Image (cartoon, rainbow, N blue to C red):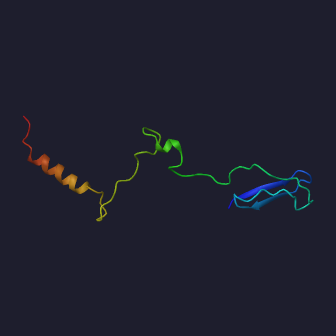
């Protein structure tokens, strides 16, 4: 449930009230009793921090964090496909005839 800030325009009394979105706004001031209790416009109380929250994090090219993820690891703790690719590459280079 959101917290709404209220302020009385007659006496200046201010209070934060926990209400459902569907609840009717309060109108009577609990301090002076007048029907001048108004809901205030306030800034959001949270910030989005970390990677993945900004538009620049999803752009390709330099400067963003796109494409900088770590390689997946195999159950043995090695990078997936790294040992098989290395073995295949070394045996392929050994079997080629020398260029003249």
Position in image of residue 41 (x %, y %): 75, 48
Give 14 or 92, whichever is nearer the viewer. 14
Position in image of residue 100 (x %, y %): 6, 34
* Residue at (11% x, 48% y) in the render: 94
* Residue at (31% x, 63% y) in the render: 77
Image quarter for residue 6? bottom right
Give 100 or 77, whichever is nearer the viewer. 77
* Residue at (26% x, 54% y) in the render: 82
Position in image of residue 78 (x %, y %): 29, 60
* Residue at (30% x, 61% y) in the render: 74
On the picture, is 75 further left or further right than 49? Answer: left
Position in image of residue 7 (x %, y %): 84, 54
On the picture, is 87 further left or further right than 7? Answer: left
On the picture, is 40 further left or further right than 58? Answer: right
> Is the residue 22 above or below the residue 99 in the image?
below
On the picture, is 21 further left or further right than 33? Answer: left
Q: Quadrant of the N terminus?
A: bottom right
Image quarter for residue 8? bottom right
């Amino acid at each position: 449930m959101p917290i709404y800030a209220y302020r009385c325009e007659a006496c200046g009394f201010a209070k934060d009230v926990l209400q459902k979105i569907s609840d009717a706004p309060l109108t009577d001031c609990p301090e002076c009793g007048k029907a001048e209790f108004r809901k205030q416009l306030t800034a959001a109380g949270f910030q989005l921090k970390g990677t993945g929250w900004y538009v620049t994090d999803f752009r390709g090219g330099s400067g963003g964090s796109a494409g900088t993820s770590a390689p997946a690891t195999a159950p043995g703790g090695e990078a997936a496909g790294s040992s098989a690719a290395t073995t295949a590459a070394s045996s392929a280079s050994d079997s080629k005839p020398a260029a003249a």
